[in-house]
Image (spheres, rainbow, N blue to C red):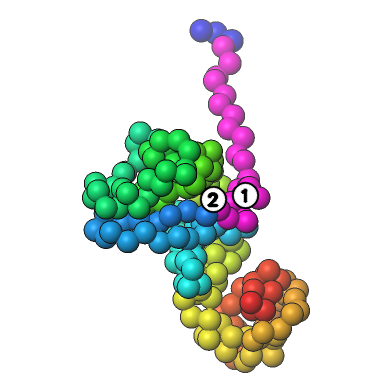
């Protein structure tokens, strides 16, 4: 039709935002299908929304890259334990509401075929529902799926730090930067990072974020 305007579809991209409750964390019970053990954990998300991680009573921490999350389920679509002993451990009479409404199932994997399930149970239905909605929102965020170069570098550094703390501290020490248990921050811009001398540049595989340097104090 003459004079018709082409259709324009505008999509407003929302920046990644991690709610305070996810940053502070909540108490959950972690369970597996192939075990009758129930592990109390504290579930959290880092402020940048890169990783979902949980810490047990022994201070052991595991993490999951949120980019690998395919779905976060709550309610009827969640997995529930089939073993009666495990159900008895989880279905405590003091907890209010149906068990399935307190369940949080995190589906993750590199693709839609090779997937794994992480099973958690909250102590309140509202907590499980909030976590399912928030995690799915973070995993499906278009800006998070198309991160900048600096954000990708920062995310890689966070993963390296959790996997090999000593390697990171050695790199900082070689660059004469704060390392070990220090209560200080060091603001290093990305331009200064790229201007480091060539002998130092290859070994300085650490993030220039003040937040990252502050992590060394813990």
Residue at the image position 43 percent from the left and 55 percent from the top: 29
Q: Is residue 9 magenta?
A: yes
Q: Is residue 39 magenta?
A: no
Tag 2 secondary structure: helix
Foreground residue among 208 and 69? 69
In this rendering, the answer to whether 15 lies above or below 42 is: above
Few, some or many residues within 10 Å of mark 2 (<14, 14–19, 20+): many
Residue at the image position 75 percent from the left and 76 percent from the top: 185
Span shown in magenta:
4-26
* Circle on res. 144: 2
Q: Dividing the picture into quarters, in which one does residue 154 lie?
A: bottom right
In this rendering, the answer to whether 71 lies above or below 174 is: above
Residue at the image position 58 percent from the left and 55 percent from the top: 25
What percent of the width, then of the height, locates residue 70? Answer: 39, 46
In this rendering, the answer to whether 75 lies above or below 53 is: above
Residue denoted by label 1 = 21
Q: Looking at the image, tell me whether mark 2 or mark 1 is earlier in sequence order.
A: 1
- Magenta segment's dominant SS is loop
Foreground residue among 67 and 38? 38
Tag 1 secondary structure: helix
What percent of the width, then of the height, locates residue 62? Answer: 44, 66
What percent of the width, then of the height, locates residue 116? Answer: 31, 54
Examine the rendering and report whether any part of residue 100 can be seen.
yes
Q: What distance separates the C-alpha of mark 2 from that of mark 1?
A: 20 Å
Foreground residue among 73 and 38? 38
């Amino acid at each position: 039709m003459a004079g018709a305007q082409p259709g324009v579809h505008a999509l407003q991209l929302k920046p990644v935002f991690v709610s305070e409750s996810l940053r502070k964390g909540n108490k959950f019970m972690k369970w597996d299908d192939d075990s009758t053990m129930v592990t109390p954990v504290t579930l959290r998300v880092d402020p940048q929304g890169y990783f979902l991680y949980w810490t047990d009573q022994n201070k052991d921490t595991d993490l999951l890259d949120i980019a690998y999350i395919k779905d976060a389920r709550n309610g009827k679509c969640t997995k529930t334990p089939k073993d009666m002993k495990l159900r008895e451990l989880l279905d405590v009479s003091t907890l209010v509401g149906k068990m399935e409404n307190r369940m949080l199932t995190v589906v993750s994997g590199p693709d839609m075929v090779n997937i794994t399930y992480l099973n958690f149970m909250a102590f309140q239905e509202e907590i499980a529902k909030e976590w399912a909605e928030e995690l799915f929102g973070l995993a499906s965020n278009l800006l998070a799926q198309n991160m900048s170069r600096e954000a990708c570098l920062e995310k890689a550094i966070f993963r390296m730090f959790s996997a090999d703390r000593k390697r990171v501290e050695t790199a900082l020490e070689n660059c004469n930067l704060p390392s070990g248990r220090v209560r200080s921050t060091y603001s290093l811009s990305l331009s200064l990072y790229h201007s480091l001398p060539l002998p130092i540049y290859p070994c300085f595989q650490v993030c220039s974020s003040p937040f990252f340097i502050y992590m060394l104090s813990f």
